[in-house]
Image (cartoon, rainbow, N blue to C red):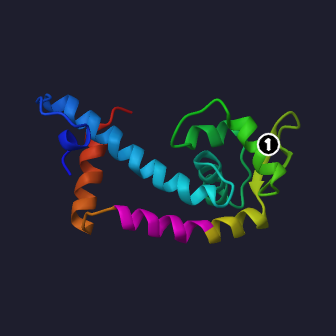
């Protein structure tokens, strides 16, 4: 469905505005689909992202600042989100060996098991909503990299 049909307009928009609206609407669909899967496991998108970051850092431990730098959506809630993951026993926290003032975190065995359970379902959901072949996916990734201002 074309974006003009989605937002129910027959007025033409300029290309830049149309692209931005299309990206925002598509992001909404992707995020809503991901959130629906994560909700079944009492996880938020940010919590899932943090678990993936910690898994990728293994065997190293990470401080909150390092995790915040790698998040897809920047947030000031990183410490509070980390507290929730610790309370769920998906993450372990300890004092840094190199700097006793710093707290570091690592993914727990339960966190790894959670990722093993959730990730295949998320991957299937993303596969189901994506109507592009592999070449189109690569092209879109390239175009979005070019479009985005980092």
- The image position of residue 106, as x and y in percent, is 76, 54
Taking depth in this image into account, of 20 and 9 the one nearest to the observer is 9
| Count of marks overlaid on the render | 1
Q: Is residue 81 above or below residue 14?
A: below
Give left or right: position of 146 versus 72. Answer: left
Q: Does the magenta run of residues contain 39?
A: no
Q: Magenta segment, principal secondary structure? A: helix
Residue at 82 percent across and 40 percent down: it is 103
- The image position of residue 35, as x and y in percent, is 54, 52
Residue at 15 percent across and 29 percent down: it is 13
Taking depth in this image into account, of 96 and 126 the one nearest to the observer is 126
Q: Is residue 101 above or below residue 60?
A: above
Residue stretch rendered in magenta on the structure = 118-129
Q: Does the magenta run of residues contain 128?
A: yes
Residue 127: quadrant of the picture: bottom left
Number of residues whose C-alpha sits closer than 10 Å to that of mark 1, classed few (under 14), some (14–19) or many (20 or more): some
């Amino acid at each position: 469905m074309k974006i003009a049909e989605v937002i129910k307009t027959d007025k033409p928009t300029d290309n830049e505005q149309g692209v931005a609206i299309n990206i925002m609407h598509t992001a909404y669909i992707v995020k809503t689909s991901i959130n629906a899967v994560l909700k079944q496991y009492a996880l938020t998108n940010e919590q899932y992202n943090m678990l993936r970051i910690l898994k990728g850092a293994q065997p190293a431990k990470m401080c909150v600042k390092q995790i915040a730098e790698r998040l897809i959506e920047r947030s000031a809630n990183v410490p509070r989100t980390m507290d929730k993951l610790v309370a769920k026993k998906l993450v372990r926290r300890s004092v840094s060996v190199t700097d006793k003032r710093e707290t570091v975190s690592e993914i727990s065995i339960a966190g790894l098991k959670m990722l093993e359970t959730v990730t295949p379902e998320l991957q299937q959901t993303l596969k189901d909503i994506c109507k592009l072949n592999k070449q189109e996916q690569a092209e879109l990734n390239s175009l979005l990299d070019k479009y985005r201002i980092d």
